Amino acid sequence: MVGIDSIIIMLIVGAVAGWLAGQIVRGFGFGLLWNIVIGIVGAFIGVWLLTQLGFVPFAGFVGSIVNATIGAVILLVIVGFIKR
């Protein structure tokens, strides 16, 4: 069972990671809602990719933001290639 506090933290991490990824990969301004979605999906991509490469995903709140940002940047780069 996922509590309301977990959902709020997930939204905050997603928003921060999506915003950071948008700053890193210029030209992708999707707005707050899409930044949250990109950040949350990016978190899954980031953790999966780090484990596939043999790295231990970062832990804690800041680590979650780092994992999500890594995945969100990769997601935005892929979306950028598809849009071209």
Image (cartoon, helix red, strand yellow):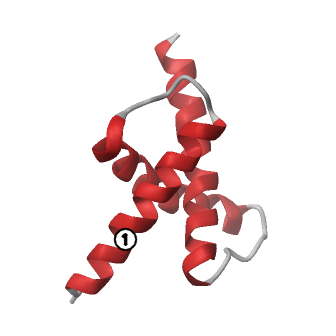
SS class of the residue under badge 1?
Answer: helix
The residue under the point 41% across, 56% down is 15
The residue under the point 77% across, 71% down is 55
**In this image, 54 relative to 3: left or right?**
right
**Residue at which label 1 appears:** 10
Q: Residue furthest right?
A: 54
Q: Quadrant of the N terminus?
A: bottom left
Q: Is residue 35 above or below residue 76?
A: below
**Number of numbered discs overlaid on the protein picture:** 1
x and y percentages locating residue 26 in the rendered image:
61, 27
x and y percentages locating residue 7 in the rendered image:
27, 75
**In this image, 62 relative to 43: left or right?**
right
x and y percentages locating residue 36 in the rendered image:
36, 52
Number of residues whose C-alpha sits closer than 10 Å to that of mark 1, classed few (under 14), some (14–19) or many (20 or more): some
Residue 21 visible in the current orientation? yes
x and y percentages locating residue 4 in the rendered image:
21, 83
**In this image, 51 relative to 40: left or right?**
right
The residue under the point 50% across, 19% down is 82
- Which amino acid does the dot numbered 1 rest on? Met
Q: Is residue 78 above or below residue 38?
A: above
Residue 47 visible in the current orientation? no
**In this image, 33 relative to 52: left or right?**
left
Q: Residue furthest top?
A: 84
